[in-house]
Each structure stands twice: as C-alpha cells, then as structure tokens.
Image (tube, rainbow, N blue to C red):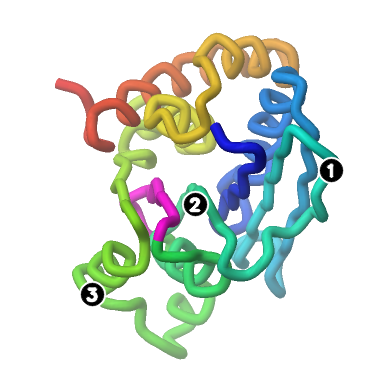
Amino acid sequence: MKGSTNVVITGVGGQGNVLAARLLAAVALAEGLEVTVGDVYGLTQRGGSVASHVRWTEGHPLPPLVPQGALDILVAFEPLEALRIQSQFGRPETAALVNESPVMPIGVQAGRFPYPDAAALWSLLDRMTGSCRRVAGSETARALGNVQALNTVMLGALCGSGLVGFEAGAFEETIRSELPARFVDLNLEAFKRGLALGGAGGKAAE
C-alpha cells in the first residue's frame, strides 16, 4: 500500500454505503493510519446519489474529499453511480468494484429520462478505469435473505480483491465492534461471501 489512498464508496440513498465507509475507515484507523471521511448527498437522501469519500495516509490527515482525477479505488453499489463518480474523480488507473444490479433513479422511475443501455455503460466503465470488476453483490445479499447486507458483501469483495491491503480479520473485528449485536452474524456472513467474490472475479462461488 502506498503512503496515501483515495477511495469513494458510492450508491443511492438506502443502500448503506455510508455505513460501509465508516467500517472501512475504522479498519484503516485500527491499522494506525490517519483517516478522513466525507459524505456527499444528492438532492434526496433516499433514492438520490450518495458518495462517501474515505482517505488515509501515513502522514498528516488529508482533506475529506478526494480531489478530481485522484481516485485510486471506486466501490460502487450501482453501475450508473460508478460512471458518475469515475467521470468526476477517477483517472485511467482507478480500480473499480461495481455491483452489477442497477437501481432506477427517481427521474427514470418518473419517466423523465431512460436508464443508459447496460452494455454501453459497462463498456464505458471498462474504458475509463484501469480495471473494472463486476460484483454480484445484490444477488449475494438476496441469497442471504436481506438485500441490505449489500454493503458488507461489497466490503468483503473489496477486501478479497487485495486492493486495500487490509486483512479479513481486521474487517471482521470491526463489524463485531461497530454493529449492534443482532446484526453481527448476518453481516459477518455477508462479508465472508463478498470475500469469496473479490477473489473469484466478482461472480458467486460455485
């Protein structure tokens, strides 16, 4: 891991990316790093765009928001939000982990504009990033019986990808310490399944 790392975890309101960012930041803090977190919300919290910036360094604390063109790692819970963030903050070397399942924005639901063609969207992401891994995050969370576990599935995929260089045990300990006891077992299992996705090219393990 280099001296500083810039991560954005993005999705739409209600997907839990703010909690995922908090857990990732707690892991980095436990590793002795200086960590800053900044959240940016769209016009509406639920159903609108939400981007959580997580930055850590071995030196002095960094400003809370990733500068434009400086994004190292993009974790997206929704494909269109991945494209939005990569367009603003990404660079050709950005590594992206993107949940495959789209969430229709409010404007699409209201019929004001169409959702982009899926093939074109993924093609753009492939061209704009250094690597773009598609993750069956929502599918995995639904198999657990709780789609809200998507955030810890994606955290597991991030850990399993090796992009952040933190051990799985550090994430598991953070989940145990930061989440209410009644949610711990579900989220540990979600993290475990995501870990397998991260090491298996983003597809569910056989």
**Three-letter code, disc 3:** Ala
Q: Which of labels 3 and 1 is toward the front? A: 1
Q: Residue at x 45, y 15 (%)?
A: 189
- The kind of secondary structure element at disc 1 is loop
Q: Residue furthest bottom?
A: 112
| Residue 108 screen position, x and y as percent | 44, 79
Q: Is residue 123 magenta?
A: no
Q: Which residue corresponds to mark 1?
A: 61
| Alpha carbon separation for disc pair 3 and 2 | 19 Å
Camera-nearest residue between 79 and 108: 79
Q: Quadrant of the N terminus?
A: top right
x 79%, y 54%: residue: 64
Label 2 sits on residue: 74
Please tell me the numbered disc located at residue 202.
Answer: none
Mark count:
3
The mark lying in front, picked from 1 and 2, is 1
Q: Nearer the viewer, mark 3 or mark 2?
A: 2
Q: Amino acid at mark 1?
A: Pro
Residue at which label 3 appears: 120
Question: Quarter of the image containing the C terminus?
Answer: top left
- Report which quarter residue 12 is drawn in: bottom right
Check residue 97 for magenta coloring. Answer: yes
Q: Is residue 8 left or right of residue 136?
A: right
Q: Amino acid at mark 2?
A: Leu
Q: Are marks 3 and 1 in contact (CB under 8 Å)?
A: no
Q: Earlier in the sequence, mark 3 or mark 1?
A: 1
Give residue 120's position: percent from left, percent from top.
23, 74
* Above or below: residue 126 compared with residue 184: below
Q: Earlier along the polypeptide chain: callout 1 or callout 2?
A: 1
Of labels 3 and 2, earlier in sequence is: 2
Q: Which residues are magenta?
A: 93-102
Q: Quadrant of residue 51?
A: bottom right
